[in-house]
Amino acid sequence: MAFLLSRMGFPLWSGICLIVSTTPANTIVGNETDRLALLAIKTKITQDPPGVVNSWNNSYHFFEWKGVRCGHWHKRVTIIDLQSGDLVGSLSPHIGNLSFLHELRLNNNTFRGEILAEIGNLFRLQKLNLSINNFEGEIPANLSRCSNLTYLGVGSNNLVGKFPEALTPLSKLIYLGIHLNNLTGGIPPFIGNLTSLVRISASYNPFGEKSKFPWIGRYSTLYLPPGFGSMFPHPQILQLYGNQFTGPLPLLISNSLELVSFDVGENNFNGKITNDFGSLQNLRKITISDNHFRNGEPDELAFLGSLANCSNLEKLRMQGNQFRGVLPDSVGNLSNHLFYLTHSENQIYGTIPSTIGNLVNLALLNMYNNQFTGKIPPSIGFLQKLQRLSLDNNKLSGKIPNSIGNLSLLTKLYLAGNRIEGTIPSSLGTCRNLLSLHLFQNNLSGTIPGELLRISTLSISLNLAQNRLFGSLPADVGSLKNLMELDISENGLSGEIPSSLGSYTSLENLSLQENFFQGSIPLASETLRGIANFDLSHNLSGKIPTFLEKFALQKLNLSFNDFEGEVPMKGVFTNASAVSIVGNYRLCGGIVNQDGEFVAAVKVLNLQNRGAVKSFIAECETLRNIRHRNLVKIITSCSSVDCQENDFKALVYEFMPNGSLEGWLHSSPKTNNGQNEHRRLNLLERINIAIDVACALDYVHHQCHTPIIHCDLKPSNILLDHDMVAHVGYFGLARFCPELTILKQSSSIGIRGSIGYVPLGNKFSLTFLYFDICLF
Ligand SMILES: *[C@@H]1O[C@H](CO)[C@@H](O)[C@H](O)[C@H]1NC(C)=O
Ligand SMILES: *[C@@H]1O[C@H](CO)[C@@H](O)[C@H](O)[C@H]1NC(C)=O
Ligand SMILES: *[C@@H]1O[C@H](CO)[C@@H](O)[C@H](O)[C@H]1NC(C)=O
Ligand SMILES: *[C@@H]1O[C@H](CO)[C@@H](O)[C@H](O)[C@H]1NC(C)=O
Ligand SMILES: *[C@@H]1O[C@H](CO)[C@@H](O)[C@H](O)[C@H]1NC(C)=O
Ligand SMILES: *[C@@H]1O[C@H](CO)[C@@H](O)[C@H](O)[C@H]1NC(C)=O
Ligand SMILES: *[C@@H]1O[C@H](CO)[C@@H](O)[C@H](O)[C@H]1NC(C)=O
Ligand SMILES: *[C@@H]1O[C@H](CO)[C@@H](O)[C@H](O)[C@H]1NC(C)=O
Ligand SMILES: *[C@@H]1O[C@H](CO)[C@@H](O)[C@H](O)[C@H]1NC(C)=O
Ligand SMILES: *[C@@H]1O[C@H](CO)[C@@H](O)[C@H](O)[C@H]1NC(C)=O
Ligand SMILES: *[C@@H]1O[C@H](CO)[C@@H](O)[C@H](O)[C@H]1NC(C)=O
Ligand SMILES: *[C@@H]1O[C@H](CO)[C@@H](O)[C@H](O)[C@H]1NC(C)=O
């Protein structure tokens, strides 16, 4: 019909218009076989939430059905395109009747079951895209009958078995995607005969499974077949990442002259790279990362020299291997198109060659987690396009070169975990695009330059922790309003904490611990409420500010300060596992102590008793700075007034579940678990208790800075923990005896309080070798 029209002088498209116009349903136009096949396909689609195949009904002709396209001439189905349709179902064998089909796109659905061999009947098929489904079983050998196939995509399914050798006749194949399946048996050699192939995507298959390799039976590991390269002359993109290939880097890679990109990352390739890449003039990207390349020879990175001839190289990723050699000077001869160079996570040693400064187009240079020594070469300043520089976790020493300030596009600078010394160069202040700066764990000294704190782009992290920085924290730190993490802990910083920190709007982590800050915490700012982790341990004095109750804190560490007064009771302070206030001996009240759910013993002093206050002070003083596994730990002390304005003093001790030794010896022992145990101590337990007590006394007598005399050692003051380890407690009569060491031999030594003898039961009264003595 269209032919006639055109012969009659009508343009051909008018004929086409006629054919695609709406046609009444019951007029038979087109092929009934196709219609039946489509309906059969529809019945196998069990779920179709968007209603894609609703239109596949008899109200309209199938060439108007959604996702179906037909040839204008013959009215036969040529394309089925149901990609990304949220469809669930399986294939119908009727599909093999659509004999004019050129393209079948079912990708990105949830089709299950096998890829039916009937597809092999579609001899006109050019593109078959079944990727991202749940197809199971093997790739059917009958696909070999689709000899015009150019695109075969079955990646991201659950296919198993070997890639069928019968597919050899697919000589027109340009793209082959079999990635993310469960295929075994290696990349078969015949793929080398598919001379049109430009792109193979075979990543993430367990190809390397040993038992499935008949052709290399005597090897225990898989090698790419020896002839692979010569049979496979024109690959441009080769993706073999994420398999289990082992052995040396295949030579094919250096012989494939048209190679633009290859990726063998995440395999088990190993040994020394001896390939000569010099002739790969088109090569742009190389990925050999995450393998086991290494042979231990100092020149094992010499292959970088041959890459110098690849004048189009843009990306070189070699991180995560076991390279152990030195980085050759020839690294500087790599292409000046190179913008991405990663050799992090190896064991590369020696200095960073100053020729690195020749790679002036580098945007990313990752060298972290290696063994580099020596200085950061000043030539780094020539890399003016650098956006990210990671040299962290090496053994670099010397100073940070001033030229670093030339890197004005830098967004991330990571130099942490080295031995870098000297001051932080103020030239860093010219890196006006920095988002994140890590200089922690080095030997940096001097003050923090104000220029650094005025880089207002710093918004992710500024971490200068674990250095030897001193001086005050400049108020300029307030310029970093958008910062999420500020860590300047473990330095020698002093002075007050600048109140300008209160202008921060996004702070989540603030670590100021282990410095010499003084004064109060001037951070009562609304905008800081989002702060999640705040560590101020080992620093300040004063009161714990109640505004911290309003912050959305997940962790608050105020330990080992000299805070006094009451511990706030609301907000984060209700969550014992989130707050640490240990080592503040002048705090009282509060709900939290330490270690999450926590039971403590509280001794409230009866202040009417004579000497109670004195005894309280003695105990606080004594236990303030001593720690021993056989002493009862004081968690905190409390000195305040109660609601009737009476003085109130209490001591909070570590809880001892097994009660006092007295209880075990003289009554039916009542453990604090509420159970009465009628068990008696056995000899071993008694001896262990004696040894524990002796250790505690040895400690207070001889190991403390000033010897301490307990003066009231008796079974009721010896407490037993969960494991029956003895702890000496109640130092209320204790005395400091600086003279002890000199005078203990003298005749003026007397015994005070309890006698230095502790009964351990009727039959086992042990007399201590260590008498607990004091001077009158
Ligand atoms: C429909 O297609 C089938 C298979 O290609 C063919 O055998 C049959 O003759 C066709 N029928 C019509 C009416 O074109
Ligand atoms: C048939 O398809 C048309 C077009 O999408 C649709 O409007 C109609 O509701 C469908 N009929 C049935 C019975 O599904
Ligand atoms: C897959 O389909 C979903 C919608 O169903 C779509 O959002 C997604 O982008 C598609 N992914 C691919 C890789 O085609
Ligand atoms: C189409 O294919 C199915 C299954 O492969 C078959 O049973 C049927 O006879 C074929 N022919 C027609 C005209 O539907
Ligand atoms: C094949 O399907 C995948 C997954 O949906 C898609 O990313 C790819 O572009 C498709 N290929 C073609 C040629 O349509
Ligand atoms: C597979 O191909 C063979 C010819 O190679 C053919 O005899 C057989 O019928 C095909 N299988 C199906 C299910 O189409
Ligand atoms: C394969 O494609 C070529 C060129 O497009 C065409 O001439 C030939 O007829 C096709 N073969 C089949 C079996 O469709
Ligand atoms: C691959 O096959 C193995 C062995 O049959 C099986 O344990 C594993 O679950 C399969 N993985 C996938 C993604 O199908
Ligand atoms: C590759 O093709 C050649 C000739 O074209 C043939 O001799 C050889 O057997 C084929 N190799 C494989 C593995 O199919
Ligand atoms: C380097 O490349 C040139 C072409 O630019 C080529 O002539 C030469 O042989 C190559 N050198 C090596 C060692 O491959
Ligand atoms: C780098 O290239 C220059 C000339 O382009 C050459 O003189 C020098 O020897 C090369 N250096 C290395 C280490 O290969
Ligand atoms: C730093 O940059 C200046 C120009 O901005 C340039 O003259 C100088 O050579 C550079 N120095 C280094 C070491 O990069």
Image (tube, grey):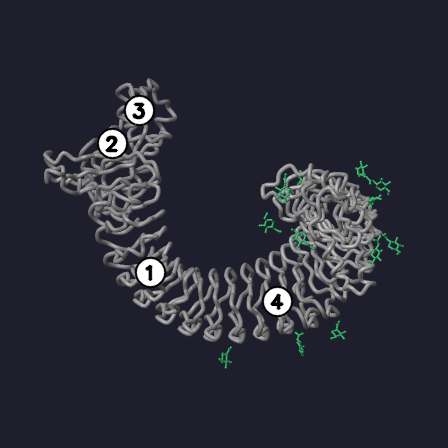
Q: Is residue 130 left or right of residue 726?
A: right
Q: Which numbered circle lies on residue 671?
A: 3
Tell me if mark 1 has few (under 14), some (14-19) or many (20+) residues whose alpha carbon lies within 10 angstroms of its own. many
Q: Label 2, on which residue?
A: 717
Depth check, mark 4 against mark 2: the one in front is 4
Q: Amino acid at mark 4?
A: Leu
Q: Is residue 550 left or right of residue 100?
A: left
Instruction: Tell me the CA gap for discs 2 and 1.
Output: 51 Å
Which of disc 3 and disc 1 is earlier in sequence? 1
Which of disc 1 and disc 2 is earlier in sequence? 1
Which quarter of the rendered image does ligand 8 occupy? top right
Say which of 354 and 381 sits in front: 381
**Residue at horizontal 58 percent and vertical 72 percent from the top:** 361
Mark 2–mark 1 CB contact (< 8 Å): no
Q: Image quadrant for the N terminus? A: bottom right
Q: Amino acid at mark 3?
A: Thr
Label 1 beta carbon within 8 A of ligand 12: no
Kindly indicate the quadrant of the structure image that contains residue 26.
top right
Q: Which numbered circle lies on residue 327?
A: 4
Q: Amino acid at mark 1?
A: Tyr
Instruction: Tell me the CA gap for discs 3 and 4.
Output: 67 Å
Q: Is residue 678 above or below residue 235?
A: above
Where does residue 151 sit, x and y in percent of width and height?
74, 54
The residue lying furthest to the front in this view is 8
Q: Which numbered circle lies on residue 504?
A: 1
Which of disc 2 and disc 4 is earlier in sequence? 4
